[in-house]
Amino acid sequence: MSAEVSQSNPSLGREASLVRSLGLREATALNMIDMVGIGPFVTMALVIDIMNGPQCIVAWLLGALLAVLDGMVWSELGAKWSEAGGSFVFLRKLYGEQTWGKLFSFLFIWQTIFQAPLVIASGAIGFAEHVNYLLPLTPLMRRVVSGALVILLTIVLYRKISTAGRISVMLWSVLILTIGWILFAGATHFDPHLAFSYPAGAWSLSPVFFIVLGQAMGKSVYSYLGYYNVCHLGGEIREPEKNIPRSMMLSIGGIAVIYLGMQLSVLGTMPWQSARHSEFIFSTFFEHIYGTDAANVATVLILIIAAASLFSALLGYSRIPYAAATEGAFFRVFARVHPTKHFPNVSLLVLGAIAFVFSVFFDRMSEVISAILAMRILIQFIGQTVGLILWHHNRERVRSLPYRMPLFPLPAILSIMLWLFVFYFTGLKFIVGASSVIGIGVLIYFAWAKMKRDWPWRVPDEGMVKN
């Protein structure tokens, strides 16, 4: 089948067009490898430790529930506006392209410049930490490894999107192989007395239980992030009105089953009291069952999965500044597309460079997880969910939706409530930090808008101000 060419800003010319060459298989593969990454291989021990026992499985179930609820929001938006940029496009459309949407979309790009490279850096740091299982590294050497990985991924992604899609399927195969091995090992060595050895008071629904559940859920939600990656690539998805919702729900459902199976595999083969303190929980898992050689092989596979996830994430994030630039809402240089390979090369290179700086600047990823969540929840997740609820008030517009979530607005409202629950338990310093970034972004936007006489300073009869 010949590939479709997605619509783009006519003012940017033919070179700005993206090619719709990713089908359901490639979209699902990109989502799944983005979701797994290094996250669960680091966070599963943290979740056990925070929850203090096998009841940690509740945190994974709630994380899956939040992903499904929020995935319905993304499905409506992605099917309706299948363009490169994801939340940038959604916020702009939902709140008004010439009014409040300008501010919200600007704030999203403002945050993306920080949080997207942080996401890449956190994965690269986790990658370097797992290399430490195979080869003891000094702190300086870990920084070198994480920085080198970011450079390598940027080089690998500097190619046609169809080639990137084929690479994603190959990397997805490694993911399935590794997860399958974990689940097989766990199932064949499963001891229910270990898996369900709850400490005293484990199910006491006290205030302390909900406090630790909120903290643990933050770690589990981080591991589920990525189910929406296909929306960032909306301009390169075939039949987006069908494939975007399907790929997200397939990804979330598949990964939820995988995470629950992985957590039960650990709990059923190792005492949770020792697993909670393991720095390399799955390397230790395989060492406990099969010995050191098997653990080394498993660690190599985990490293491949981590690199694959960062490959998918950097691919998706690189489309966001590109989309903003094509709309005149960001520096025009980011709208450039490679003349022959047809991908946003400037955006990819800039985000890769910032991610490299972060990856060598930070040493540990545990606190980076909370910082990423706090920064994204208010504007991106809650902001676009509230916007969608308001947008639904116009029945004519709602009829144009290719996909509509069941039981609207209940899933959207529950999603907001769960996001606020997670946000609260990220911690005061991260809440203050995220709020400060938003506040600074608001000031910058209004100063920039006043200089360009754009909204809200634009005189109504002047029309749109060219960039």
Image (cartoon, rainbow, N blue to C red):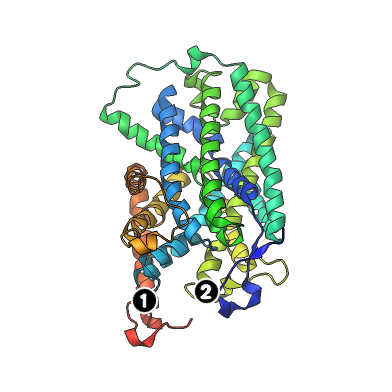
Identify the mark nearer the N-term, 2 or 1.
Answer: 2
Query: Which residue is labeled 2 in the image?
Result: 331
> Pointer 2 and pointer 1: residues touching (CB < 8 Å)?
no
Q: Secondary structure at mark 2?
A: loop
Q: Is residue 152 visible?
A: no
**How many tags in the picture?**
2
List x then y, in percent, for residue 199.
Answer: 38, 17
Neighbourhood count class around disc 1 (C-alpha, 10 Å): few under 14, some 14–19, many 20 upward: few
Question: What type is the residue that disc 1 sits on?
Answer: Ala
Where residue 447 is drawn, which disc sits there? 1
Counting from the top left corner in percent of width and height, residue 84 is at: 55, 63
Residue shown at 56%/35% (left/top)?
A: 41
Check the image and report above or below for 130 versus 434: above
Name which residue lies at 32% across and 77% down: 456
Q: Does residue 176 sit above or below 419 in this rendering?
A: above
Badge 2: few (under 14), some or many (20 or more) residues near its Cα, within 10 Å? some
Secondary structure category for the residue under label 1: helix
The answer to whether residue 185 is left or right of residue 410 is right
Q: Residue furthest bottom?
A: 462
Query: Is residue 437 found left or right of 193 in the rendered image?
Result: left
Report the residue that reaches farthest toward the top: 193
Kindly report which numbered mark, 2 or 1, lies closer to the viewer in this rendering.
Answer: 2
- Left or right position of 192 against 394: right
The quarter holding residue 218 reads top left
Q: x%, y% of residue 245?
A: 51, 49
Q: Which mark is residue 375?
A: none
Residue at 45 percent across and 54 percent down: it is: 76
